[in-house]
Amino acid sequence: MAAAESPSAALRRRDLCSRGIRLAGKMRADVVDLLDAYVERQGLDASASVAAVEGVPPAAVERWDEQTGTQRLLENLAAYRAFRALLAQMLEEQREQLGEADTGLGRALAAVLLQVSAFAYHLEELLRLESRGIPGEEGDGPPPPPRLSLFEQKLRGLGVLRELAQWAVRSARDLRQLAKPSLATDAATSLAESP
Amino acid sequence: PQKLKCVTHNLHKMICTWDVSSRGSHGQTEFCYTTNDLTPQICFKTKERRVEIPVPESSITVTIKSSGIAFATKEFVIHQKDISFVPVTPHILSLTSDFATSTLNLKWSDNGSVFPYGLHALWQIQILRKEAMEEVTEVTYYSKLTHEDVILAWNWTSDMPLQCTSHYVKIRCYINATQFVGPKDWSDWSPAEVIPGKDTEPGGNGVFPLDAVVAVGSNVTFCCVHEEDQRITNMIYGSKSYPMMQLSSRSHAIRVLNASASDTSGTNVVCTLENGMDGTVIFVGYGPDVPQNLSCETPNFLIIKCTWKPGRPSGLYGKRRTKYSLFERISGKNVSCEVNEMNSDRICGFPVLPDQKTYDFILGVSNPIGQAQSSILVDITQRVHPKTPEKLIVTGNNSTSIQLRWFINGSFADIRLLCQIEISSGHSERKLHNVSMPGGKFSTYTAQLNTLHPYTKYQFRVRCSSADHFWRWSDWSREVEQTTSEASPA
């Protein structure tokens, strides 16, 4: 028998979800601005096609409707942990390559990294609320990428920011889905069934 | 036997060859020679039509008796002028490459031991490139033979990254044997040695040079190494597409002339292929200028601060930025300076060393494009620029005099200080009062001002410098205000 979610937990979850949606919206706006600045500062072609970035789960997912709440949260968390590591790598490369020359881009990157970290923490809060254990950080995100050439670094950065912008949209949709009462029982049920 | 021809490769021995009509070509030949009437004739039998005999001082008489279907004997007199001198084909000992600098390093032996001392040798070195082995350049190198085998070395910097396509090197030589009267000629070319390009390597694809740094105004060749079956669409430098040259079936190149300064993140060079894209980044900047207005002073006899004007910005940042180091010749001490590329003035600190007054500094400046330096000799006791006096307070006053006290951060025990007190009150003119005193170690200093007016509000501030060798005043201290007490009734 599925345990019904207490009113206070439901209220807390909807509050976390709506704050998460706002955070995702802000993050997306900042990422889009950063993407424009990044393309311009790195001398890239905005329409350049970039291979999928290793270590980042793609935002596009099949049968999105059929996902349970927990699956959504876990996939989101995995993605933002990966983004956290990749953005930190980009920031390090930025400092190494440009030093004090382009602090504007560096600050914008750091700001988005902060938001990604905050969003990851937010997702962990939601998982805790679902009395769901927080998956450990296997070795702190994706394995360190092979030593890339500068051009490959630039393209990877472009790929990361594009994918992050997609994920921000998906996250907002996932959280709206989670905020719906019906889904709450799915989450509770999937907890009951899990070992 | 006919058409006897002799060639020497080392001025000692010569190889003579001759033709024989078809009827006489199968049997054995007796070959006899004598250099002059006094020496006995030397004979030997051979099946070859080729013998090696000594080079004569002047001439040699040769008799060739061939025994085939018909016997034939012929005598020849060969003069030195009829003998041609063609040096042995040189042998390349090693051909190595430095891809980072696109440099080929060639080593070969001059084979000098077989020649007399002092002969002049000319070496022609040919560089070839591409699948078609097109000649890129031919250089003549001069050397002097020393009757020993000497290993000669020569290097060449390509105008194109060595990764782009295979480079080949051949060498031949000409020896100016002035004493030898016969015709002299170039040796044969050596076999070509090769430095394979990435276009011969499976998986060697990429755009080259990889992440290079070059000076503004350089002419740079970029190449895109791709799979054989991959069609290349274009190659773009920055935002401009350039005409492509084909180097091989797997390599295309563009040539950028007079490259202009790149943005902070470098200029992208993008190779667009029908199913993908590859690229590299190049940083185009300036070598460092010679530092201008180098000046060094000490604020406290603990540290020496050197400042300078950097000149034209290099346009290079991050790990490619211009780096500065301060080397002091007397002590041999070297300090690397942390400099913020973005602000215009430059400053570097060097510790004051025990028992050393004079410092012979070399400010070294370098970045991936070049280096420069400035030097300065300075006696720090003549370059004292004290810190701003602090904690200025009034420690005593009466109707006509006031005592001031202040602190200066620094160790001035070895010099005398000259301090200037500015006295201002109301609308009257500011007065300056100079006082000199022995310097101290992180200590306070006092001064007494007399002949003040009773019951008058005064503002005081102080600055100091070296009394023995004035260099620069410190900044003014903060101001203090004090009113003298009323005069006691007469």
Image: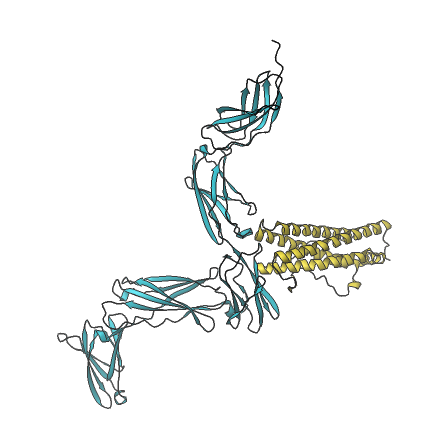
Chain colours: A yellow, B cyan
| Residue positioned 77% across, 63% down in the render | A64
Give the camera-side residue of B152 and B392: B392
Percent from the top left, x then y, of residue B161? Answer: 49, 64
Count of numbered tags: 0
Task: Reply above or below: B298 against A117.
Answer: above
Task: Reply above or below: B39 against B407.
Answer: below
Give the camera-side residue of B7 and B33: B7
* Residue B364 in sight here: yes
* Residue A139 in sight here: no
Give the camera-side residue of B169 and B489: B489
Q: Is residue A194 left or right of residue B226?
A: right
Percent from the top left, x then y, of residue B35? Answer: 17, 75
Give the camera-side residue of B140 and B440: B140
| Residue positioned 59% across, 61% down in the render | A152
Q: Residue furthest top?
A: B490
| Residue positioned 78% across, 58% down in the render | A174
In which quadrant will I find the C terminus of chain B? Answer: top right
Location of residue B42 (image quadrant): bottom left
| Residue positioned 80% across, 63% down in the render | A65
Percent from the top left, x then y, of residue B413? Answer: 48, 27
In which quadrant will I find the N terminus of chain B? Answer: bottom left
Percent from the top left, x then y, of residue B384? Answer: 48, 33
Location of residue B140 (image quadrant): bottom left
Task: Reply above or below: B341 against B194.
Answer: above
Location of residue A142 (image quadrant): bottom right
